[in-house]
Amino acid sequence: MHTPQFTAESSSNGMVERDFTVGDVPGVLWSPAPGAGRAPLVLMGHGGGHHKKHPAMTGRAQRLVTGCGFHVAVIDAPGHGDRPRTAYDEQEVAELRKAQAAGEPEGPIVVRYNARLAELAVPEWRAALDALRELPEIGADGPVGYLGIGLGTAIGVPLVATEPRIRAAVFVSTWPDVLLEKARQITVPVEFDMQWDDERVPREAGLALFDAFASKEKTLHANAGKHLELPRFEADSAVHFFARHLGRAVTSPAA
């Protein structure tokens, strides 16, 4: 087992940002100021076509770090961010763009591609979690949460289903086609966000995924609006959700 190899460090907006690698997988760890003591870790999975420092990730990290003192980690999914695209990645992206341009359904392509990325990414996430828990400020017995958006949900559902160290999860809706079996294995508390007027993921599909979770505590947040119109207050809700289930108090208002 290896600790993360840190490659860069900076501080801004009340948190420390450290780039790292585990093997050949690049990631970023956001933390409170040094000396804050041991704190829980929240893993976040970025959306398709995005990367570890996309604004959707940095904004949520800011809330989690400054609002509760969590550590927050994101790794680039295969073929995303600082990771090279394979010929397979290029082919799938080209097929997706072609379908979108023609107004054809994109779901079958996204489901297929995301499923392959999840097969690769789940072991990478588990290796990253092993490494991050070697850090004294996180610790081998510290609580862990997971937050996924889009592709991050497609990767996160099988990850949470097979990773007993994750105690709570927030998912933003994605196509459920290959996720239902794994969702039925998830029993930790879940908060599930979906857009009621989503033009990409059908409403019935989002509800089917929520219904499949076997958690005794699961909460559905359905908001009016289209796929990319998830309200900002859902990020604040996630802070309070993780504070409840990972044993922290919300120490300052989310920015």
Image (tube, helix red, strand yellow):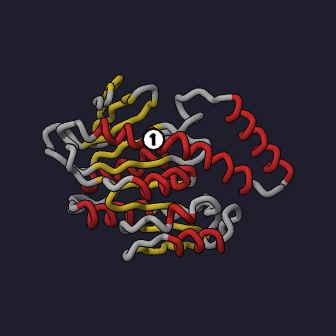
- Along the viewing direction, whichever of 141 and 245 lies nearer the viewer: 141
Q: Position of residue 113 (x, y in %)?
A: 66, 46
Which residue occupies 28% across, 30% down? 3
Q: In the visual, does 119 lie left or right of 145?
A: right
Q: For residue 44, say whether it is visible.
A: yes
Q: Secondary structure at mark 1?
A: helix
Which residue occupies 45% across, 41% down? 123
Q: In this view, which residue lies farthest toward the right?
A: 102
Q: Quadrant of the N terminus?
A: top left
Give the residue type that dot 1 points to.
Pro
Instruction: Write down the quadrant of residue 162 in the picture.
Output: bottom left
Q: Position of residue 142 (x, y in %)?
A: 22, 50
Which residue occupies 45% across, 47% down? 57
Residue under pointer 1: 123
Q: Is residue 204 above or below residue 69?
A: below
Q: For residue 227, say whether it is visible.
A: no
Q: In the visual, does 134 lie left or right of 212?
A: left
Q: Is residue 21 above or below residue 124?
A: above
Q: In the visual, does 127 lie left or right of 93?
A: left
Q: Quadrant of the C terminus?
A: bottom left
Q: Position of residue 44 (x, y in %)?
A: 42, 49
- Along the viewing direction, whichever of 69 and 182 lies nearer the viewer: 182
